[in-house]
Amino acid sequence: MLKDKLGREFHYLRLSITDVCNFKCNYCLPDGYQCDSERNFLSVEEIRRLVTGFARLGTSKIRITGGEPALRKDLPLIIKTCKSIPGINKVAITTNGYNLEHKIEQWVEAGLDALNVSIDSLKPDVFRLITGHDKLTSILRGLDKAHQLGIKDIKINAVLMKAFNASEFTDYLNWMRDKPYTLRFIELMQTGDNLNFFKQNHVKGEDLKKQLLDDSWSSVIRKKDAGPAQEFFHPDYQGRIGLIMPYSKDFCQTCNRLRISALAKLHLCLFTEEGIDFRPLLQSDEQLDEFTTSLQQALRQKTASHLLQDGETGITKHLAMIGG
């Protein structure tokens, strides 16, 4: 089992397969993707070996991320490869939804179990203002398709920002009343290049939590492979609400996920070090034992918490770098 010095167990891997993104979200890539690093991303064989090593150490859930993972043409093969590895019982993807309507059948056929889609506004004009794309209607059709194809675990991600979509909080709740999705509000995070934007637009997750509790929402018991969200349910709503609040007290206490970048660097936290390069140990099946041993040793370096509350963002210039 992958376990750190604080006793936290890691059942969940966020695997980035590209850092390229075709959206220009104002809180992440306002100037669009800048090709300022190596683009020799992990091959399918390297991914197979990497996920096999993690699975041998107790990882059961893989979330495929980017950038935008659907920009890789071999995404269905990557999903199928991850799903075929003994011990992996859940393969999920986080996407901006650009290709969702046209690609979801391929992903489901490949074995996809869960889907996260970013929808930062339910108003087409605001969605376009935030993302740079007029794709909201297509994304909503893609969600309906995913549900019809049998994907039961569907989550919607939204970053609330004061000057853009914070006023839509109630609109989102009303929208979720008859939809079997989990809507997750992600607290805007400071990164290396967005300090002024962060100061102008940060909405406190704790304020949203208070509003939910005041409106009779109740907490959901957390599963061992769950992500960082605190989830809430209400008897009058078919869907659930999740809050991801990295600035809340003890946010890191229940950390159960690790991150691998598209270049095979292990990141023990989204907001810390440069990453530990594991690519040399993914070149043959004979290296798997060495890989798993090195992985266990690396966990000893994991710290108790990030220092976001002190304004320290580590190497993270923007959230597309290592999969958010």
Image: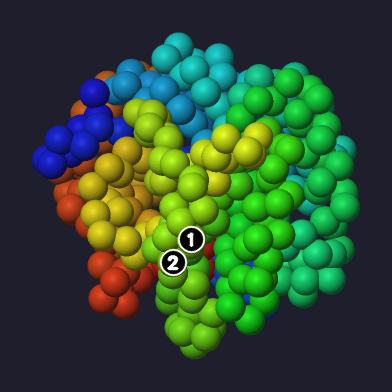
Tag count in the figure? 2
Across and down, in percent, residue 204 comes to 44, 69
Q: Is residue 197 above or below residue 106?
A: below
Q: 19 and 43: which one is in front?
A: 19
Q: Is residue 14 above or below residue 173?
A: above
Residue drawn at x 54%, y 56% is 185
The amino acid pointed to by label 1 is: Gln
Residue drawn at x 57%, y 35% is 235
The amino acid pointed to by label 2 is: Asp
Give left or right: position of 153 versus 260: right
Name the secondary structure under disc 2: helix
Across and down, in percent, residue 260 comes to 42, 44
Q: 99 and 206: which one is in front?
A: 206
Across and down, in percent, residue 156 comes to 64, 47
Residue drawn at x 56%, y 19% is 83
Residue drawn at x 42%, y 15% is 87
Q: Which residue is mark 1?
A: 211
Quarter holding the N terminus is top left
Q: 43 and 247: which one is in front?
A: 247
Q: Is residue 257 above or below residue 35?
A: above
Which mark, by number, is residue 184? none
Q: Which residue is mark 2?
A: 207
* Circles 2 and 1 in contact, beta carbons < 8 Å: yes
**Alpha carbon separation for disc pair 2 and 1:** 6 Å
